[in-house]
Image (spheres, grey):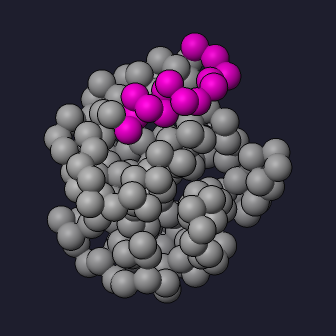
């Protein structure tokens, strides 16, 4: 198990990715700067999942209920499905379907890099959004109006919306 800095992963995505404009680059640079340089342990598969997810920043457009991998128009669960597929792992489409696979993770503190994280966006307690845990209390997801981006589990909009995680890797 190698140790990677979250900031290093984000920096790799900036170098490796091609961005569509200065807004995306600025947002990604700002996110990288905001992430701690705390080192997290992750297997090579978990590292690959995170690196692949970062590569979609600025490239994916969100649309509910859509999974057009050729045009990169995806909803949250088709984004996670694509990232896992790119790493040789087949998962179903749909946040509730993805909540049924792997091993349950009840608390944020037990999450591992590469875990799926599920949230309640509409009806309290009902899973309706999914992302991928990247370590240090942060996750990457695909959202309306934003596309693929990094958010905190512990502050802001998602702070009180976490339902569970799933160990898939």
Q: Nearer the viewer, residue 135 or 147?
A: 135
Q: Nearer the viewer, residue 160 or 75?
A: 75
State the residue at coordinates (17%, 41%).
38
> Is residue 36 toward the left or the right of residue 26 in the image?
left
Whether residue 44 is situated above or below residue 126 in the rendered picture: above
Q: Residue furthest top?
A: 22
> In x, y percent, where is residue 142?
56, 49
For residue 161, say whether it is visible.
no
Q: Is residue 157 part of the magenta span, yes or no? A: no
Q: Which residues are magenta?
A: 9-22
State the residue at coordinates (34%, 83%).
104
Whether residue 87 is situated above or below residue 148 in the rendered picture: below
Which quarter of the rendering shows the N terminus?
bottom left
Q: Nearer the viewer, residue 128 or 87?
A: 87
Q: Is residue 16 part of the magenta span, yes or no? A: yes
> Is residue 67 toward the left or the right of residue 11 in the image?
right
For residue 60, say whether it is visible.
yes
> In x, y percent, where is residue 143?
56, 48
Q: Nearer the viewer, residue 86 or 23?
A: 86
> Is residue 72 toward the left or the right of residue 106 in the image?
right
State the residue at coordinates (47%, 53%).
48
Determine the image quadrant of residue 5: top left
* Secondary structure predominantly adopted by residues drawn in magenta: helix
> In x, y percent, where is residue 85?
63, 65
State the residue at coordinates (48%, 79%).
99
Which quarter of the rendering shows the C terminus?
bottom left
């Amino acid at each position: 198990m190698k140790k990677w800095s979250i900031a290093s992963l984000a920096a790799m995505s900036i170098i490796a990715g091609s961005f569509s404009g200065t807004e995306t680059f600025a947002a990604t640079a700002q996110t990288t700067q905001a992430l701690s340089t705390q080192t997290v342990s992750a297997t090579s598969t978990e590292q690959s999942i995170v690196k692949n997810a970062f590569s979609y920043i600025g490239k994916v457009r969100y649309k509910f209920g859509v999974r057009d991998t050729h045009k990169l128009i995806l909803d949250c669960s088709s984004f996670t499905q694509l990232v896992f597929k790119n790493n040789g792992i087949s998962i179903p489409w749909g946040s509730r379907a993805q909540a049924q696979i792997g091993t349950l993770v009840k608390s944020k503190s037990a999450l591992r890099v590469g875990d799926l994280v599920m949230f309640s966006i509409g009806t309290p307690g009902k899973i309706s959004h999914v992302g991928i845990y990247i370590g240090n209390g942060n996750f990457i997801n695909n959202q309306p109006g934003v596309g693929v981006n990094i958010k905190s589990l512990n502050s802001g909009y998602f702070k009180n919306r976490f339902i569970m995680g799933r160990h898939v890797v």
